[in-house]
Image (cartoon, rainbow, N blue to C red):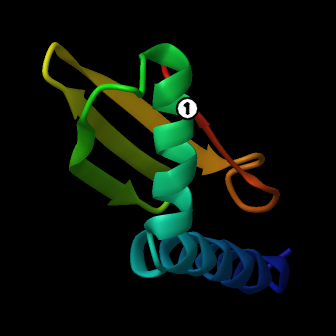
Amino acid sequence: MRQAVPLLLTVVFLTVAWMSFDNVWTDVAPTQALAEAAACRAKDCKHPHGVTRVSRWPTGQTFDITWQDGVVTVTCHRESYVLGPMQCQVP
C-alpha cells in the first residue's frame, strides 16, 4: 500500500500538468474558433461580434463573445477533461 501512494501521486501530478499545459499554455486559436462556432449556433453571426474575455484554467476554457445587443458565454473542455476532442457549449 505504501508503494502505491507515490505512484498515485505521480499519476495525479502528471495528469494535472498535462491539463495545465493543454488548456492554459498552448495556443488558444483552435479552441477560440470552436467557441465562436458554438456562439454562432446560439446567436446570429451575421452581425459584428468579437471575443471580449478569455478565461483559461486546467480543466477548460471560457470565452465571452460580444455582439452589440448582448454577450454569449461559451465553455470549452476536452471530452473527458483529460483526453478526447475539445468540445464547446453554451451553458
- Left or right, 83 with respect to 10, comes to right
**Picture quarter containing residue 76?**
top right
Q: Position of residue 61 (x, y in %)?
A: 43, 51
Visible in this render: residue 59? no
Residue type at mark 1 is Ala
Viewer-proximal residue, 6 or 70? 70
| Quadrant of the rendering where the N terminus is positioned | bottom right
Identify which residue is drawn at 56% across, 21% down: 41
Identify which residue is drawn at 30% across, 26% down: 47
Identify which residue is drawn at 34% across, 28% down: 73
Viewer-proximal residue, 9 or 67? 67
- Left or right, 88 with respect to 7, comes to left
- Local packing at callout 1 (Cα closer than 10 Å; few below 14, some 14-19, many 20+) is many
Q: Position of residue 40 (x, y in %)?
A: 49, 27
- Left or right, 81 with respect to 57, comes to right
Q: Position of residue 53 (x, y in %)?
A: 20, 47
The residue identified by callout 1 is 38
Visible in this render: residue 29? yes
**Picture quarter containing residue 71?**
top left
Viewer-proximal residue, 65 or 79? 65
Above or below: residue 40 compared with residue 25: above
Above or below: residue 85 compared with residue 6: above
